[in-house]
Amino acid sequence: MELLSDAFVYLCAAVIAVPIANRLGLGSVLGYLIAGVVIGPVLGIVGSETTEVQHFAEFGVVMMLFLVGLELQPAVLWKMRKQLIGLGGLQVVGTTAVFAGIALAFGLAWQAALALGMILALSSTAIVLQTLNEKGWLKTQGGQSSFSVLLTQDIAVIPMLAILPLLAVGHVAGGGAAHSDGHGHGGHEGGGAHGGEALAALPGWAQALVIIAVIIAIIVAGRHLLRPVFRFIAEAHLREIFTATALLLVIGIALLMDFVGLSPALGTFLAGVVLSDSDYRHELESDIEPFKGLLLGLFFLTVGAGIDFNLLFGAPLTIFGLALGLMAVKFALLFALGTLFRLDGPDRWLFALGLAQAGEFAFVLFGFASSSGALEQGLLQTITLVVAISMLLTPALFILYEKVIAPRAAAKSDREPDVVDSKGRVVIVGMGRFGQIVGRLLLTSGYDVVILDHDPQTVENLSKVGIRTFYGDATRPDLLHGAGVGDADLFIAAIDDRDKQTLVVEHVAKTYPNVKILARARDRHHVYELENVGAHVAEREVFEGALALGKQALVELGSHPFRAQTKAKEFRNHDFAMLDDLRENYNDGGVDKSYIDAMRAHAETLFDIMKVDRGEERHERTERGWNPPPKSDATLGLTPEGEETRG
Amino acid sequence: MFETANAVQGVTAVDLYARYPDFNIDVDAEQAQLTEHDVVIFQHPLYWYSAPSIMKEWQDLVLEYGFAYGQHGHALDDKVFLNAVTTGAKSAAYSEEGMNHADLRSLLAPFEKTADLCRMRYLAPFVLFGAGRAVEEGRLDVHRNAYDDLLKALVAERLDLDKAARADVLTEDLYDFILKGEPV
């Protein structure tokens, strides 16, 4: 029961605080943090157990990195190498050096100073990535640079974990024992405690060998084993089992990483990268996404709840001064780096302001540093608080950027806005008989097309002929979101099932008002239905095909091919005119008597059009082709002698 | 040139291939549009000494008996008709002695006769010769500016129509054809 009541308290705080914070423009992260402060230090509903919950919630960071990996194809990662090593590397090394220098000046031993420097060099992946994503800044230059630095920091955690025990002053904790406590920033209790030990017995080279073997195993399995497994599971058409599989995958990899003493976050990130080429990427994304969101939220809650108000009120000036000082130093270094790497005005500000806090990894590394004796207890408590405050202040910096710097830069710059993907992005759902034709036309015309289909067999077959298709049920809002409908220019709904089709169009029209929707319609009534729920264009699926066959039939029956073509064209024109004419009638009461009457009238006109037998005066307005003038017009020189030529 | 035309106030620029990609020309709409305007310009490259096919289709369907010509077809009476063309060959090719053994206006006779039959005033064609090399030779901008002047003069009714009807061709040098007077 305690679990349920705890869950109730946390969820309650989140549900109340986050929407309010969002409404006020503060962003969800600050909402969670405030909720945490309220239920923790202010109301005292939750207390000491928050540290435990926090360890659990850190798994959200692991999931987040898995998702980040899913978004990053290896080719993209390779393209980023310069940013990762240059920008990211300089940030980590430079910031470490500066903080270590400051700590030395304050009289700390060099080992402790170095430990502190490394820990404070890290920024908060959780807050920053979440915010960049939420605000849609991740694709900007500043966002991309921030992301590169965060990624480098995540990777840098591994060598840091290796170095920290070596920096222990005084009592020397056994390397293995130290490992068991820290084991990576995403660490959680339980399994990991045995992690380092499992390999500690082996000599160094063997450890390294095991680690390399595990990484290779993940890559090979990800490439060759997961697709058949996912396919097998997808064919069961049980959504929750697919979700379970996705969770199993992430947790499994985290455990495996733990076991060999590597960071679970890094491991799942790697797994994500491997799977980023897979057909199941979008489905995996939308399955993991809610878990990640909740766990990260919980993590922020616990950060808020964990603030030690006694210590804070004991020396508020010192604590806040340190926090602001910390952020000022990081900001200055980042700003300089931004200048060095030629980031433009607002991008440089976003980059420098966004990454100015210390990160959640610091909490984990502090735990690690304290157990290994690299840093002493009293200092740790103060610094922990400073880190928490700096994280708490981060949303304010983003608000500063959003409300002050970005508008000012926008007003000042007369530069053309960046052309984002001028080729146009298209999402197609439904890759059956209809969607395939549309999709192939667009793909062969060189457009960037994301295709979703709910049938594993179709997905597999299309992949075989080289058309990248993702598995997933398009009626799921989260999956549509994952497929990038929000960034698309065009959404093409080509689902066979009539009701599902309407449902999907309605959802997309409501959720993404800027996306143009083209939809396949079953028949005329479905056209109206789709238009009413927000489709911009609806095309009847069999109309053109049937017309083409009808035209062939006329030819077979002896019509001149061009005559048959003209007839079909007339028929088509009339039918489209009827589609327009009947729209209002249909929307006003559906298929009622007046609708049927109107249809009957149209059928009669059509009959007249098609049967026109052309005699002397061929000027019925109903058929438009080249018509010779009548012989009786004396003004045109048509009389045998041609006595009059023109008037 | 289409953009130039589109930017002039009082000019309706129509891309026929965009409006009717399947050649399914809406005759009623086209006729209504003709009625609303005083000048009709066929702006096109010279394909086989004529206009691209959709413009022929447009003539076949839109210039109907009883609308554009015939005893009761007076919808286009006294409107102005002009070909604004670009040619591949240089101006020397369009002469008795040149490659084509005829000047441009003679070659465009079917358009002139069509305009006559519709009781419209046919002006000498406005032409950019040797269009393929116009950009390299810096002639395109000159021509576009002249086109702009021509269209503005037509809109402001300051083009000397009689003189333009008598000329062989209209080129960039329009000075003699634009009437002086109070700026509009």
Image: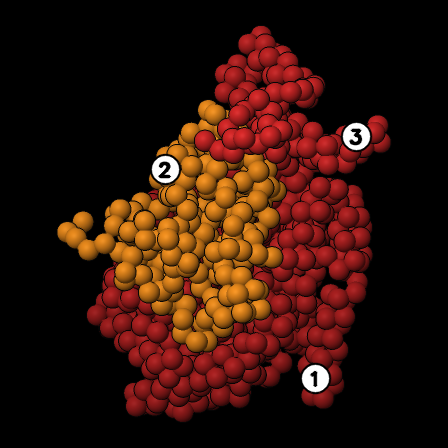
Chain colours: A red, B orange
User: In this orientation, which residue lies closer to the viewer: B146 or A34?
Assistant: B146
As drawn, A140 above or below A587: below
Q: For the residues tagged 3 and 1, is the chain the same? A: yes
As drawn, B179 above or below A497: below
Chain of the residue that carries numbered disc 2 in the rendered image: B
Q: In the rendered structure, which amino acid carries the disc numbered 2? A: Asp
Kindly check if marks 2 and 3 are in contact, taking CB atoms under 8 A apart as contact: no
Q: Which numbered disc flags the more N-terminal residue, 3 or 1? A: 1
User: In this orientation, which residue lies closer to the viewer: A186 or A445?
Assistant: A445
Q: Is residue A8 visible?
A: no
- Where is mark 1, residue-wise? A208
- Where is mark 2, residue-wise? B78
Chain of the residue that carries numbered disc 1 in the rendered image: A
- Where is mark 3, residue-wise? A559
Q: Secondary structure at mark 2?
A: loop
Q: Residue at x 31, y 72 (%)?
A: A345
Q: Residue at x 41, y 68 (%)?
A: B140
- Residue A466: image quadrant is bottom right
